[in-house]
Image (cartoon, rainbow, N blue to C red):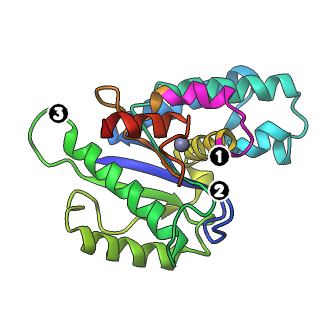
Amino acid sequence: LYLLYIDESGRAANPAEHFVLGGLCLHESEVKRMHLSAESILTQYLGQSPDAIEIHADHIRSGRGRWRSIPIETRDSILRDLCNLLGRAPALFCVVRAPEAVASVDPLERSLEELLLRFHSYLARLRGPSQKRLGIVVADKSRYEATVQQVVYQWRSIGTRFGRLHRLVEVPLFIDSRATRMVQLADVVVHVTYRRYTAADKSLFELILPGFVAESGIRHGLVHLAKNYRSCPCPACISRRLRAA
Ligand SMILES: [Zn+2]
């Protein structure tokens, strides 16, 4: 079973804003190792049992909440090390919706659809023993409280429409992000990606970029839904032009 832990950054409901949906995918056997790697980064810098402190990229970067008392150098180092860890992750995915890029009555739908199709294609491309590989999407229930019904409904309609999402468990699993580092790491992925596209803050994004799913030089894991994709210099659009060539 492959788990895709997802989070979002920006507001899907406002078509005039950037919106990022994505996260990290792990095989069930890889979850514990990733968890321990994240814990060891926190312990290294905070020197204590870090269980109680949540990884929240925006708070780490700007020194808010529980991170307020931690020096900026330490916070920067933690975020950089987490991004290096994510850059070596088995598979990252993000769909970046540019402002006014999607002429849809439902602004969440296109991003979710693209993400599910990319995840599904990834599962289908994996090599190895031929048993069917299944995927499940795991999301933070508190972050999704407002949209949970909508997401589940869309999930079903998209699955039906494409008919080929047969590798995905029909509904996403909603959990408390405080209980798992994996959803917190998904938050880092979408936050850093959001900053790349909205604040031209590329340094951390460059660290996670190698983690996005790629095959034969085509970066399937990163999608930029933008009207100017033919000239956009971002890695997703460059990859899209390569694929089309
Ligand atoms: Zn682009």
Q: Do the residues bearing badges 1 and 2 touch, measured as CB atoms within 8 Å?
A: yes
Label 3 sits on residue: 127
Ligand 1 resides in the quarter of the picture at: top right
Cα distance in 3D space between marks 1 and 3: 31 Å
* Residue 163 x %, y %: 20, 68
* Residue 117 x %, y %: 32, 55
Q: Residue furthest left?
A: 130
Would you place residue 41 above or below residue 25 in this image?
A: above
- Residue type beneath disc 3: Arg
Label 1 Cα neighbours within 10 Å, binned few <14 / some 14-19 / many ≥20: many
Quadrant placement of the C terminus: top left
| Image-quadrant location for residue 112 | bottom left
Cα distance in 3D space between marks 1 and 2: 8 Å
Horizontal arrangement in the rendering, residue 46 relative to residue 241 (left or right) = right
Label 3 Cα neighbours within 10 Å, binned few <14 / some 14-19 / many ≥20: few
Please say whether residue 182 is one of the residues in the magenta stretch: no
Give the magenta part as a residue range. 197-209
Q: Which mark is residue 18?
A: 2
Cα distance in 3D space between marks 2 and 3: 35 Å
- Residue type beneath disc 1: Tyr
Label 1 sits on residue: 194
Q: Which mark is residue 57?
A: none
Would you place residue 141 above or below residue 185 in this image?
A: below
Please say whether residue 202 is one of the residues in the magenta stretch: yes
